[in-house]
Amino acid sequence: MVDPLDPGTLSLPLAFKRSRGRPRKVDALSAAERARRYRARKKVVSMHAVPAAMYAEVVRERDEALARMDAMRQELEQLLAQFTR
């Protein structure tokens, strides 16, 4: 507001400058909501972890299967050698 009796007052623009930085989002999450979502993601990731005992069993079964496959491959080579004579 300009005082008409005071010559020292200036008329100020009614439009305000925007504040510095990136404007806030309308649907921004609060810190508590971000923390809750973070904990939920961490919980899901931890549920996908394989227990050590189960991992050891699978590795043992894989090694046994590889050993059986090698034995079968050797037997096949011996049979093929017999037929090619």
Image (tube, rainbow, N blue to C red):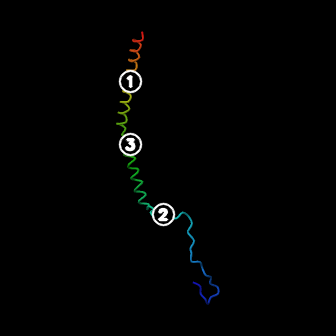
- First-in-chain label (3 vs 1): 3
Q: Quadrant of residue 76?
A: top left
Vertical comparison of 12 with 62: above or below: below
Mark 1 Cα-neighbour bin, 10 Å: few <14, some 14–19, many ≥20: few
The residue sitting at 46% across, 65% down in the picture is 26
- What residue would you read off at disc 1? 69
Separation of residues labelled 3 and 1 (CA atoms): 29 Å
Nearer to us in this view, 59 or 5 = 5
- What residue would you read off at disc 3? 49
Vertical comparison of 3 with 33: above or below: below
Instruction: State yes or no: discs 3 and 2 in contact (Cβ < 8 Å).
Output: no
Q: Position of residue 48 (x, y in %)?
A: 38, 44
Quarter containing the N terminus: bottom right
**Residue type, numbered disc 1:** Met
Q: Quadrant of residue 11?
A: bottom right
Nearer to us in this view, 76 or 22 = 76
Looking at the rendered structure, the secondary structure element under dot 1 is helix
Q: Position of residue 17 (x, y in %)?
A: 57, 71
- What residue would you read off at disc 2? 25
Q: Quadrant of residue 56?
A: top left
Separation of residues labelled 2 and 1 (CA atoms): 60 Å
Instruction: State yes or no: discs 2 and 1 in contact (Cβ < 8 Å).
Output: no
Looking at the rendered structure, the secondary structure element under dot 2 is loop
Residue furthest front in the image: 84
Looking at the rendered structure, the secondary structure element under dot 3 is loop
The residue sitting at 56% across, 69% down in the picture is 18
The residue sitting at 38% across, 14% down in the picture is 79
**Number of marks drawn:** 3
Residue furthest right in the image: 7
Vertical comparison of 15 with 34: above or below: below
